[in-house]
Amino acid sequence: MSHDPTVNAGDIARLAGVGRAAVSNWRRRHDDFPSPIGGTANQPLFSLRQVEAWLRRYGKSYQVSLGDRVWQRLKAAGDLRLGELVAEAGALLTVGESTLEPETATLVTELAEQHGALTAYEFLVERYLEAHSRQLSVTRDDIAALMVRLAGADRGTVLDPAAGVGTLLLAAGDSVRVLGQDLSDNSACIAAARLRLRGVQAEVVAGDAMRHDGFPGKRADAVVCDPPFNERTWGYEELTGDPRWEYGLPPRGEPELAWVQHCLGHARPGGLVAILMPPAAASRKAGRRIRANLLRAGALRAVIALPGSDLWLLRRPMAGERPPSEVLILEATEDLGSVEPAWHAYLEDRSDQTVRIIDLLADEVDMTPARHQRRDDLGRAFTEARDRFMAAAAAPPDLKVLDEPLDQPMTTVGDLIKEGLVTALQAPPKMVADGGDIPVLTADDVATGATASGRTAVPDGLVAVEPGDVVASYSSVRVMAEGGAVLGPHLTLYRVDARRLDPDFLAGFLRAAGGRATTGSSRFDVRRTRLPRLSLDEQRQYGTAFKQLAVLEDALRETAALGQTLIRLGLDGLTDGHLHPHSS
C-alpha cells in the first residue's frame, strides 16, 4: 500500500461540503485542478494530498476526518483488496492482530480510540458497502429485523448459511449463540468482527455451504437466510445424491430450493426457518414437486410477498405431528406492519388469509401471493386505495398575482445569525447512524418527512432536534414538528428566535434559494440567502403559504405511490371480474 491515498469525485464533494456538480465545475474551470492518477474516464481517482493542497490554495473549506484518512488509506490498495483490508481492520480491532501495514494499523487504532472500536469499524463497513453496493447484496434492515422476529431468532442458537457481512445475524441481538457461513472469506471475517465487537457469541466460517457445509450435523433453534438468487453453478451435478434433499432433488435452475432444504436440514425439530426467495420460486413449474412435498409434510407454512422478494416461513416437522391443512399466503409489499399480526393469527388458527393445501396440490402448486389475495379483499383494497388517493390530494396556496414585485428591505441569513435571530448548528463531522439506542434524523428522513430512521450509540457532540427547528440537507428543507431525535450526517439545523422570526418563513426562503442554486456555482452559501425584513405577522402569512407548498409536495409524493397501487388493483379487479365499470 505504498500508493498515495486516492479520492473520487464523490469523496471530494463530501470533504469540501459541496455537490458533485461543483467538483465537475472546478475541473472544467481550473487548469491547475489535480489530474486523475487512476480509475477510469467515468470514475477518475485523484491524489488526496494533491486535492487537499488545491483546496487550501483556493481557500475552499474542507475537513478530512481521521475516519476519512483511514478509509482513503484502505482504498489506496485498489478495489480488489478493499474487502480484504476491511476484514483485516476487523481482525485488528477484535483479536489485536492483522496484516495491515503499520501506518494503516496505527490509524485504525487511533480511530477506535477516538470513537470506540464498534463505531469505528461500523464506519469502515458502511463505506465498504457503499463502495461495493453493486457487488454486495445486503438485506434491508427492516426486513432483517422482521425475519428474526418471525423465526424467533432472538433466542437460543441461530444459523445463517449465507451470512454476507452479518446483517441478519446482527438483527438477532446479543443474547443468542450465532453460527454463520459465507462463500467469501472477506465477508465471513467482516461478519465475525461485527458480531464480536457487539459481544455476540459467534462462530463464523468461510466456504461454499452447498458443497462444504461448515456445520455438518448441527441443528439450530432458528435459521435465517437471504441466499444468492439465480446461481446456476450451485453444485447440481456433484450433489445429486445429497441426503439434504428430503423433499426432492432441486432442479438445476432452482438453486433457491436447495437453500430451503439446506436450511431445514439445520433446524431442530419444531425449529423455524425464515428465507428470502425470488418471487418466481412460488410458481415455477420446475419446482412444483418440491413445493408440493414441502406442503404435504407440513414444512412450508407461509409465503409472504415483500418488496422485491418473497419471504418463506418453514418449520421442521416433529416426529408424529399432524401437518396443517392450510398455509398462509400474504401480499404485504405495501405494508410490512401487516406481516406479524397475520403470522400470529395463522399460528393461533384464527387467520382469514390462508389457502387450503389440498387446493394448491390439486392445481399447479402456484403460491404466488398476488394470485391468492382474497377476492373480496381486492375490491375493498381498491376502494380504500381510491379513498386514500383522493384524501391525499392537497390544494395549492391562494396567492395574489402582482403586476410589479414588491420593493422590500432585505437581509440575509448570515445577518440574522449575527443578530441572534437564528442559531446554526451542524451534526458531528463523522458519525455512524447505524446501531445504538439514540434516534438519528437522516437526510432521507428530511426529504420524505419520515421519523428518525437512523440510530447511534455515541452520545458525545450530538445536536438534539427540537420542534420548530428548520433542518436542511443539500437538497431538502423541513420544519420539524417533533423533537426527540439528534441531527444526522450532512444536515444543518437552524433554530430561530420564535419571538422575532417564523420558522416556516425562513424554511421557505432557504428552500427557494437552494432550488435556484445553479450547478455551475462552486458552492451554495446558505448564509447569503436573501429574505425580506418583515414584521412577525407578515412573516407568518408567508410561512403559511410556504407550508402549504411543502404539504402539496408531500401529497404529490404520496399520491404518486398510491396511484401505482390503485392502478395495479384496478387492473387485477377488472381482469378477474371482481371489479366492474359503472354503467353509463
Image: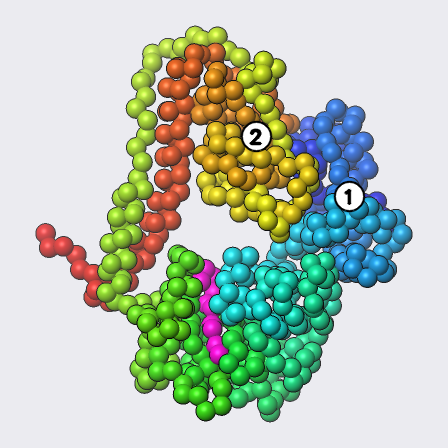
Left or right of residue 17, residue 343 in this image? left
Residue drawn at the location 39% of the way across and 60% of the way down:
338
Q: Nearer the viewer, residue 320 or 256?
A: 320
- Residue designated by label 1: 114
Would you call the spot at circle 1 few (<14 residues within 10 Å), some (14-19), or many (20 or more)?
A: few
Q: Quadrant of residue 69?
A: top right
Comparing labels 2 and 1, the label whose residue is closer to the camera: 1
Identity of the residue drawn at 54% across and 25% down = 495
From mark 2 to mark 1, how far is it between C-alphas? 25 Å
Q: Amino acid at mark 2?
A: Leu
Give coordinates of residue 237: x percent, y percent: 62, 86
Range shown magenta: 306-315
Disc marking residue 139: none
- Main SS, magenta residues: strand
Position above or below: 109 against 161: above
In the image, residue 511 sits, relative to residue 81, either above or below, namely above
